Image (cartoon, grey):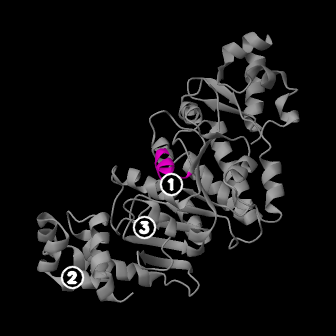
Amino acid sequence: MEREELRAWLRLVLTPHVGPVTARALLRSLGSPQAVWEAGPQAWARLVSSREAAALAQVPPDLEAQCAATMAWLAAAPAAPDGEGGHHLLTLADPHYPSRLLDVANPPLLLFAQGRLSLLQAPSVAVVGSRHPTAQGADNAHAFARALSEAGVTVVSGLARGVDAAAHEGALAGAVLRGATRAPGSTIAVVGTGLEQVYPKGHGPLLRRIAEHGLVLSEFLLGTGPLPSNFPKRNRIVAALSQGTLVVEAAVQSGSLITARLALEMGREVLAIPGSIHAPQSRGCHALIRQGAKLVETAQDVLEELHLQADGAGITAAQSELALGEEADATPTDPVLAAMGYDPVSQEALSARTGWGPAELGARLLELELMGQVARLPGQLFQRVAAA
């Protein structure tokens, strides 16, 4: 992109009181961002409100700095000719701009991207959920995402802590297990900051792996920090890029349910994994299921509901890895696991159920925890971790 074209797009984005809807109206009437600025105040007055026309007449004070920063960012990692890797800036006029985003009432004018642009056209499912999932919820997010990625489906999420991070990790693992990290599958992280920033801070290594094997996407200009208002805006892109949204765990009031609502408004499917009636993280999923969301137990359920065709050998792995509730797992022989069930439980309650003393039970719980079959929760509670 030439500097003057970039400058024209950035000026549209930076002009106060002129949002994506107004900018699109100007572009429809005048043809290009350069033509918008060449048209001048008389043309603007015919097309937008007086307040917006006055804003268009003022050059944003940070325009030149933002233009220089963006040019430097693009030059730091030039994109390959096939669009696979490097830094990209997609405009509404770019052929790589994802057509699914046009289902949003206010699609972003610009998208900053790092990684594999081909994933924007691949079959995709959003996997979202709590930032503070149960151990079972985190395992489910990882396992579902891995199975979907193995089956050739791209997993979209928001790089938040908890379910989002587990879903990205699982999708990356699924892409590697396929033996070809550049095959369909893998993951897209839609972030709520500028792409040169890392948020949450501890996700730097994960972000770099996604940029290498998947795609990182943001509508926010370079230098944009993690403002609270950015994340609900980010959610609409997560929902729009995906053919369906899978909610793993969510409280009744949560960003994940916002993503689910946005998906429904765009005509996308919403799916949810049920959980314990005692877990706050499951109540949002149960509410969605009561409202008509598809209850899913396996990755195959997701593929069938969204009419996605798994490619080749990936489906076998997806089915075998996510056979939740297998007969062998449903009837554990270990007396502590059998007494525990799947709900969080205290050591005192387990002692009453098994008849074991505190020392014997505590030792067995530690063994099961080290084996990855039991998770220790806050409040001195324990929960069985099913084979996801």
Q: Secondary structure at mark 1?
A: helix
Residue beneath label 1, please? 239
Residue beneath label 3, please? 195
**Front-most of residues 264 and 144:** 264
As shown in the figure, which amino acid type bears the numbered disc 3? Leu
Q: CA distance from mark 2 to mark 3?
A: 27 Å
Instruction: Name the residue rendered at 79%, 49% in the picture.
Output: 321
**Front-most of residues 195 and 270:** 270
Q: Secondary structure at mark 3?
A: loop
Q: Secondary structure at mark 2?
A: helix
Region of the chain picked out in magenta, as a range: 261-268
Comes first in the chain, label 2 or label 3 = 2
Residue beneath label 2, please? 37
If the image is split into quadrants, where does the C terminus sit? top right
Residue 306: tell me if it is visible: yes
Instruction: Name the residue rendered at 38%, 66% in the picture.
Output: 108
**In this view, the mark in front (3 or 1):** 1
Comes first in the chain, label 3 or label 1 = 3
As shown in the figure, which amino acid type bears the numbered disc 2? Trp
As shown in the figure, which amino acid type bears the numbered disc 1? Ala
Membership of 269 in magenta stretch: no
